[in-house]
Amino acid sequence: MAVFRKLLIMMSMAVAVLAISFSKVCGDPDLLQDVCVADLNSSVSVNGFSCKKNFTAADFSSMAISKLGNTNNTMGSSVTGANVIKVPGLNTLGVSLSRIDYAPGGINPPHTHPRATEMIFVLEGELDVGFITTANVLISKHITKGEVFVFPKGLVHFQKNNGKLPAAVISAFNSQFPGTQSIAATLFAASPTVPDDVLTKTFQVGTKEVEKIKSRLAPKK
């Protein structure tokens, strides 16, 4: 009986291993149908968007990033997305693009994309770019027209135009909606606000400095 029980346990373990291996080889692919055009008006809550029944070629096309963005702002930069919101046909496809324009001296301040790795291609101008690893190591480079640079998923990164002419890049993401979390805005312009004592302790500054930063980053009403 003991031998039989041991044999049964071994067989069960073997079946479990085979099942795991088989699932890795034959599991569901990313797409379970040809297309799943996002129904942006649906009230159904899913991880992504539900599919709409009727779609056209227009759902797979957009001129969203064809024009220069408005860089007349505090940061001197403009990010224009071509994600699933602008191109519903991207739903479930796992890719998207953005265009970023920079005035001379403009910056796309330190931020993260929690759901995607980003690769930029310099259309015009030159940029100083970089990302910081979880070991607080800065990886930075000066890049010019025609060059690409990669920012790993989830890591804090930035781009700064220190040139005398405008610059522009196209950003590619391996997510239909990568999300963007600006470090400064996240900490100092959250709603409700992050408590002052958390920020003063974190940055080792006084309450007046924290309130000053909050007032400058507060959303315009």
Image (tube, helix red, strand yellow):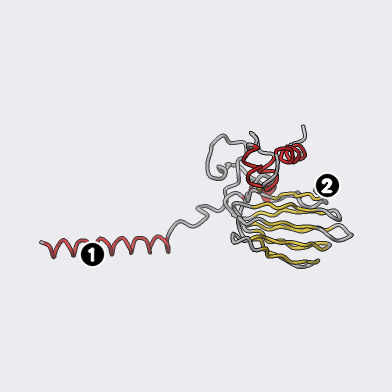
Q: Secondary structure at mark 1?
A: helix
Q: Is residue 197 above or below residue 110?
A: above
Q: Nearer the viewer, residue 169 or 192?
A: 192
Q: Amino acid at mark 2?
A: Asn
Q: Nearer the viewer, residue 130 or 137?
A: 137
Q: Is residue 6 above or below residue 186?
A: below
Give the percent coordinates (x, y) of residue 211.
73, 37
Specify the farthest residue to the left. 1
Residue lying at 78% horizontally and 57% vertically, measured from the top left: 160
Q: Secondary structure at mark 2?
A: loop
Specify the farthest residue to the top. 221
Q: Quarter-wise, where is residue 104 in the image?
A: bottom right
Residue with the mark numbered 2: 70
Residue lying at 77% horizontally and 62% vertically, measured from the top left: 128
Indicate which disc residue 154 carries: none
Label 2 neighbour load within 10 Å: few <14, some 14-19, many 20+: some
- Looking at the rendered structure, the number of numbered marks drawn on it comes to 2
Residue lying at 55% horizontally and 42% vertically, measured from the top left: 50
Give the percent coordinates (x, y) of residue 88.
64, 46
Q: Amino acid at mark 1?
A: Met
Relative to residue 164, is residue 156 drawn left or right?
Answer: left
Q: Quadrant of the N terminus?
A: bottom left
Counting residues from the N terminus, which is met first, the one under dot 2 or under dot 1?
1
Indicate which disc residue 10 carries: 1
Relative to residue 1, is residue 44 drawn left or right?
Answer: right
Give the percent coordinates (x, y) of residue 206.
70, 41
Distance Cα–Cα, label 2 vs label 1: 66 Å
Give the percent coordinates (x, y) of residue 165.
88, 59
Relative to residue 10, is residue 174 drawn left or right?
Answer: right
